[in-house]
Each structure stands twice: as C-alpha cells, then as structure tokens.
C-alpha cells in the first residue's frame, strides 16, 4: 500500500487542547497515517507539543506548516517535529530548510514539483487531483502520467481524496503516496 499523509485542517488548531487531542487520537487510531502535518494559522506551544507526542505514540512522521516557512522551521526545531511543509509561495525559501529537517512543498504543477525537488525539497504534494471545495479545477489522474519515476517516488497526490477507491486509483499511478485533509477526519 502507498504511504498516507494526514494534513490537519486549519480550524483544528483553534480548538481547545482536549478537543484537539481527542480528534487527532481518533483519526490516528482509525487511519494510521504514515505521516501527519499540523497546518495552522498559529499554534500555541501546548498544541505543538501535543501534536508531536501523538505522532510519536502512533509512530507517525510529524511535519509542521505555519503561514511563514521561517516560523515553521523555528518551531519544528524547538518542538521536535521531523520536518516542515512549505506553502506554494515559499518555493525560493526551500534552500533555507536545515538538513536536519525533512521537507515537503505544496506544488500545483509538474513544473513546480521539479523546481521544488531541484531546490532541495524531499517530497511534494501535487494538487488538486480531484475536485475540492474552494480550490482551482482538478488536474485529474491523467495529469500524473507526465511525471517521471523519480518525481513520482517523491510525490503525494492531494486534493479531493476522500474515499479508498480514490486512494487505489492514486496507487495505480505509481506515486509514493496520497495526502488528504477530509479522508482522515
């Protein structure tokens, strides 16, 4: 089976700590993702520590995605995250990620995937693959056929993935994995 990458919705970080922990515990227990990313407009210290601890409990590789990549890097290093997830606007900042942190980049085209990998990103998400509320039109499954085997080995499809049938379609394209928000919640 391909790898799975759970990305939290931004609103989750606005809940109280107990609700945050309960929601993630249920998600991680049910779906057992290989990786998880805390995506938040801001994240208080207790939330960051809780996320890292839950990921360790379930042997999940933890990533952090804050509005600014520099903040993600600082907080990831301080709280023990495995890596950071850079937003699309942070492409030029990828070389600033320390080698001690793993990195994801949010790409929206095959060209951006290659640029991010060339700049040192370890992995990319490519989105949207399927229709997603409030996002641009989907790239579609056939779009993935233009990617090289090397790119596919470092790529997680994202966008509109809410059912196991879609995960199987992604797997048939030879990608490393899939990422989703709604699939895991």
Image: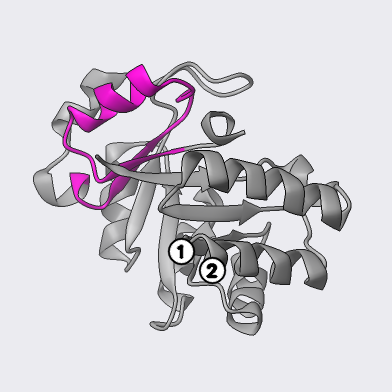
The Cα atoms of the two marked residues, 1 and 2, are separated by: 5 Å
Residue drawn 71% across and 72% down?
A: 49
| Residue, disc 1 | 59
Q: Is residue 46 magenta?
A: no
**144 horizontally vs 61: left or right:** left
Mark 2 element type: helix
Which structural element holds mark 1? loop
Residue 8 image position (x, y, % from top left): 63, 45
The quarter of the picture where residue 61 lies is bottom left
Q: Are marks 1 and 2 in contact (CB under 8 Å)?
A: yes
In this picture, is 102 found above or below 164? below
Quarter of the image with the N terminus is top left
Q: Is residue 7 above or below residue 133?
A: below
| Residue corresponding to mark 2 | 56
Nearer to me, 121 or 6: 6
Q: What residue lies at 46% left-to-right and 64% top-to-bottom?
A: 59
- The answer to whether residue 177 is magenta is yes
Query: Residue 68 location in percent, x, y?
Result: 66, 63
Quarter of the image holding residue 77? bottom right
Name the residue at the left extreme: 149
- Image-based side of 71 in relation to 86, left or right: right
Residue 129 placement (x, y as % from top left): 38, 25
Q: At 26% across and 63% down in the image, what residue appears?
A: 118
Count the labels in the image.
Answer: 2
Observer-nearest of 102 and 115? 102
Q: Which residues lie in the magenta part?
A: 152-179
* Residue 26 in the image: above or below residue 44: above
Q: Observer-nearest residue: 179 or 17? A: 17
């Amino acid at each position: 089976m391909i790898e799975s990458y759970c990305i939290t919705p931004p609103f989750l970080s606005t809940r109280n700590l107990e609700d945050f922990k309960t929601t993630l515990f249920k998600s991680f227990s049910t779906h057992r993702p290989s990786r998880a990313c805390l995506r938040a407009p801001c994240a208080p210290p207790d939330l960051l520590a809780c996320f890292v601890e839950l990921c360790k409990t379930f042997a999940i590789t933890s990533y952090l995605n804050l509005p600014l990549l520099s903040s993600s890097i600082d907080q990831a290093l301080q709280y023990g995250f495995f890596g950071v997830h850079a937003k699309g606007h942070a492409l030029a900042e990828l070389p600033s990620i320390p080698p001690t942190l793993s990195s994801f980049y949010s790409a929206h085209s095959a060209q951006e995937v290659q640029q991010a990998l060339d700049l040192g990103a370890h992995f990319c998400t490519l989105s949207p693959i399927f229709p997603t509320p409030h996002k641009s039109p989907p790239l579609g499954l056939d779009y993935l056929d233009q990617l090289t085997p090397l790119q596919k080995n470092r790529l997680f499809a994202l966008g509109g993935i809410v059912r196991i049938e879609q995960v199987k379609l992604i797997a048939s394209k030879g990608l490393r994995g899939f990422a989703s928000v709604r699939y895991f919640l």
